[in-house]
Amino acid sequence: MTSSDPAAGPAADMAPVALALARRLARGGTLWCLSPTWPHHARHVAVEFVHPVMVGKAALPAVVVPSDDPVDATRSLVRDGDVLLVVGPGHEPSLVDVCRRTPAWGVETIWIGAGDRPDAALADHLVWTDDDPARVSVDGRLILVYHLLWELTQVCLEHAGRQLAEPEPSHDVCITCADEALVAEVVDVTDGAAVVRLQGTTTTVDTTLVDTPRPHDLVLVHAGIVLSTLDEPVAAT
């Protein structure tokens, strides 16, 4: 989890964010850009990555997510191994709803924003300024942030090799079954079971311990069993 030091400014954590993004892009991932409140920022990020302004730099796959129904649009577009970059204030409900689902989709998240911060557990990387969102969205500072992200991502990709190796997972696992509890999104429901999207793949899990979930519900799955439904944003454990 990356979270900018307020005293250092939003650029303080950009290097690890760029490295994480480069890792996914180097493995064929796509950068999806979403900003319902400031759609011009999503378009700007996508153009920045697809059409590099510097000669010799790689054109990278980046696409704007339609913001009329962010959750449904993102769900239908993203695939395991992709990255979702959202730009917006921390109180934006649609961004919160999208980001809490990305662990089930196998998607890494970068949230660039201003003002009140969202729960740090909602995004893998939080790049933030605590200034007034209305002013920051138009004064060019957010543009400088994702320009820097583009430049550092290009640097990482130019030095492919050990630097782009995926880090070893650091999740705690159950000492009994060596499995961990993960967030999944329900796709379909049958008697006593459900098909869920879990880390980007679909699998069938047992639902007999909980009330029957509905499609698109978020659930916590451990060892193939749904332990609970998730009504509030939580981090995958």
Image (spheres, rainbow, N blue to C red):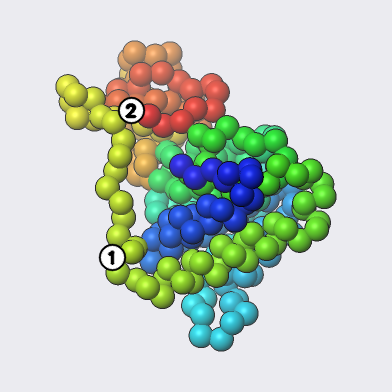
Q: Could you tell me which residue is drawn at 63 percent across and 43 percent down? A: 6
The outermost residue toward the bottom is 55
The mark found on residue 162 in the picture is 1
Give above or below for 89 relative to 208: below
214 relative to 23, above or below: above
Label 2 residue SS? loop
- SS of the residue at dot 1? helix
- Cα distance in 3D space between marks 2 and 1: 30 Å
Q: Name the spot of residue 121 as percent of width and height, x first.
A: 50, 34
For the residue carrying disc 1, how many other residues have a C-alpha within 10 Å: few (<14), some (14-19), or many (20+)? Answer: few
| Residue at image mark 2 | 181
The percent position of residue 27, horizontal first and vertical second, equals 36, 63
Disc 2 residue type (three-letter): Ala
Give left or right: position of 14 versus 163: right
Q: Nearer the viewer, residue 93 or 77?
A: 93
Q: Residue at x 42, y 38 (%)?
A: 104
Q: In the rendered view, tell whether residue 235 sits above or below residue 24.
A: above
Disc 2 packing (10 Å; few <14; some 14–19; many ≥20): many
Most extreme residue toward the front, as rendered? 7
Quick check: can you spot residue 215?
no
Q: Nearer the viewer, residue 62 or 18?
A: 18
Q: Position of residue 79 (x, y in %)?
A: 43, 52
Which mark is in front, 2 or 1?
1
**First in residue order: circle 2 vs circle 1:** 1
**Residue drawn at x 33%, y 64% as measured from the top left:** 163
The image position of residue 151, as x and y in percent, is 55, 70
The C terminus: image quadrant: top left
